[in-house]
Amino acid sequence: MRVLLASPRGFCAGVNMAIECLQFALDHLGPPIYVYHEIVHNRHVVESFRGRGVQFVEHLDDVPLGATLLFSAHGVAPEIRALAKQRQLRTIDATCPLVTKVHVEAVRFAREGYTICLIGHAGHDEVVGTMGEAPESMVLVESEDDVERLELPPDAKVAYLTQTTLSIDEAERIIGRLRQRFPQIVGPPKEDICYATQNRQEAVAQLAAQADLVLVLGSQNSSNSRRLCELARSQGVPAHLIDGAEELRREWFEKVACVVITAGASAPESLVQGCVDWLKQHFRATVEESIVRSEDVHFALPRELRQLQRTVPPSEASQRDPQKPC
């Protein structure tokens, strides 16, 4: 069996930054650290941090007054920030800068009097946070059918934004339909779908033609991981979205000569290597790295952590909390 490892794959700069933020908070402050929603949408990452004293919450009422709260990579609405301030929480903002960009654009368009069509998936943490920036000015659009149902005057002042982890093709179809209905519509100066989402989709699109099967490492609630799986299937290639090698089934690989493996932007490389080891063990697989595009993006830690770094060395945190995990 031949295995092609798609590159780029796995952690993007925003996920790396969010995980570094949480790691830094643990090292310098010690547990418990509270996180609003999952730090990133990956079961293995979340369970690993939970085992080290991190508590993931859906409501700020579950966070004790004065505790340390970290906002996840997906961003939060202004009302959550205000509530955290009321509860005197020490907040650390691990929002991906590319998500913050969308929030800033939403505020600007709303201030300028636009009705904003946010292209995204209902209930996704990123969408909830973005819509919270201008709820009176924003409408969620999930499909071309939703565009048809929009009740706006033909000459309405309309803008669009997108969730950062969408399928590029899906977003372009919806934007195209919006432009047909509202030729005057405006968008962001630079598209919102993040570089990592685009690069991972490009790699799968190029490599799927060689594959009999595509494996995508990622959790079911990871939007960008689901899009990778859908992209492979749209090209007629069977694909499975899995959390790790423990979910692999031998029957998937009957008459399979070439497997492409990729990983969503929130999936650790260790999960990829676990699948590679499984395929080597069961099918004597040979492995090739297939580089479609290189990435060298890095986001700095937020200001509050850089300030903490100067005032609270890790050694002091360890002495203050002897129960801190290694």
Image (cartoon, grey):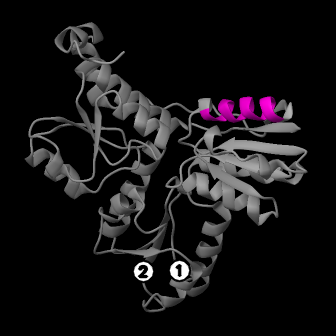
Magenta stretch, main secondary structure class: helix
Q: Please state which of residues 279 and 56 is positioned toward the viewer in this rendering.
A: 279
Q: Is residue 39 left or right of residue 11?
A: left
Residue at figure coordinates x 59%, y 73% from the top left: 175
- Tag 2–tag 1 contact (CB < 8 Å): yes
Q: Is residue 229 left or right of residue 207?
A: left
Q: Which residue is mark 2?
A: 157
Does the rendering let one see residue 264? yes
Q: Is residue 212 left or right of residue 171?
A: right
Q: Give, as a three-letter code, the residue at label 2.
A: Lys
Task: Report the span colored magenta.
Answer: 271-282
Q: Give, as a three-letter code, the residue at label 1.
A: Gln
Percent across and percent down for residue 262 are 70, 43
Does the rendering let one see residue 301? no
Residue at figure coordinates x 73%, y 55% from the top left: 239
- Does residue 321 belong to the magenta stretch? no
| Secondary structure under the numbered disc 1 in the rendered image | loop
Residue 186's place in the image compared with 293, above or below, is below
Percent across and percent down for residue 260 are 79, 44
Q: Which residue is mark 1?
A: 184
Residue at figure coordinates x 51%, y 83% from the top left: 146
Percent across and percent down for residue 173 are 65, 73
User: Crowding near pointer 2: few (<14 within 10 Å), some, many (20+)?
Assistant: some
